[in-house]
Image: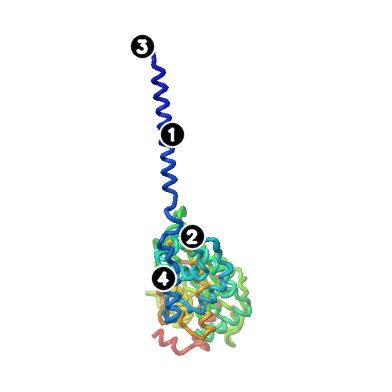
Amino acid sequence: MVGYNYYNYNTEVHRRKVLLVYLYMLHKKKRKQRSKPRWYIKPFLKERRVHGHCHCLTNEQQLSNSALYQNFMRMSSTTFEELTCIIGIKIKRIPSRPDVLSVGEILSATLRYLASGESMTSIMFSFRIGQSTVSNLILQCCTVLWDTLSPKVLLMPDTNKWAQLAKEFENKWQMPNCLGSIDGKHIVHQAFANTGSTNFNYKGSHSIILLAMCDASYNFTVVDIGAPGRCSDGGVFSSSEMGKGFLNKTLSFPIEKEIDNKSGPIPYYAVGDEAFPLLENLMRPYPGRGKKRLPLNESIFNYRLSRSRRTIENTFGIMSSKWRVFRKPIVAGKKTVIAITKAAVVLHNFIKMSEQNAGVRYYTEISNSDMNNQEMGALASVNQLGTNTYSANAKIIRNKLKDYFSSDGAVEFQYDKLF
């Protein structure tokens, strides 16, 4: 029997232990080297204050050509400075960092992203800001824009304000007791992580829904943002805060008023298309298209309602033509997509209000948006927002308006459009 050599065994075990320790230390050293950044700030980012858009291109435009600046930022330099002052105290920065971004830089990058529809990577290169920083600052800035501007330009109207809006709507669009028009649009985006088909809509894309109401001058008055795109049935309207306000009559609408000496008092109402339910405070067209020919008075009512409802289509058209981020699917997370949509809504109202006070009209170009049933890029219409059932009172109110538009409330051009 040959004896076992314990000396050789112990030597081999020891050699293997030493080798394992060596390999472990080598692996740890390589990981440390790999995770160690090559530089604190990438070289091309250090040139931000020399070659970045905010410090060269926008400054040149601001000094030499105000129209170019407005085209680039979608607002005048005066409005930009006003907006910078409003949001300045809300923007969180890190003053100790050598590459700290100013409020003007953060706002410029965010506005350019919204206006151009470019990717966040493109904004990184043009403004010379780190990619993760761009993503974070767009979310932060859009959130701050909504928080600071919505109390100023999107405050829920009270009874007196609604009455004022109704008077303006009748003067401009010949629609008595009408408070505005309402519609819903899909905000298309890339699929969110871990959401499955929640936001998958009937058009085969992923989206959230923007439900909005506007006044006669293309200003948003009430909005509801964030419903999943898959909800294309009656649940969208009934489950939204706006829809609940209509259904429960809690939106502080004025008390009903007579529109002539024949019909009696008629409630104040909004106008929508076939996607919405017929309510006492929400009018929709008479059904019937294609082979079914409607009576003349119903056709006149549908034309007058469609003409008034064009205001919300124009409002969406103006917004999407100025903020081209909506012209294609937004590549961002759910929180950022909702923040972007909210920011665009309040910026729309804020810029229009600023231009009105200054006596100029650059932002609102109706000639480019005054079109019926125009699909504006990624802003696709919502298929169905309410049920087709309605109360007897709602039917009576619609019939009263139908009769009014064919008698005392008739306008000359309505017959030209129908024949």
Q: Mark 4 points at which residue?
A: 116
Q: Mark 2 points at which residue?
A: 334
Q: Mark 1 points at which residue?
A: 21
For badge 2, the amino acid type reads Lys
Q: Is residue 126 left or right of residue 166?
A: left
Going from the N terminus, do you reach mark 3 or mark 1 first? 3
Q: Which class describes the residues within 10 Å of circle 1: few (<14), some (14-19), or many (20+)?
A: few
Name the residue nearer the viewer: 282 or 292: 282
Q: Mark 3 points at which residue?
A: 2
For badge 1, the amino acid type reads Val
Mark 3 → mark 1, Cα distance in angstroms = 33 Å
Q: Which class describes the residues within 10 Å of circle 3: few (<14), some (14-19), or many (20+)?
A: few
Seen at 47% across and 61% down, the residue is 133
Res. 276 in view: no
Disc number at residue 379? none
Seen at 51% across and 76% down, the residue is 80
> Which is in the foreground here, disc 3 or disc 1?
1
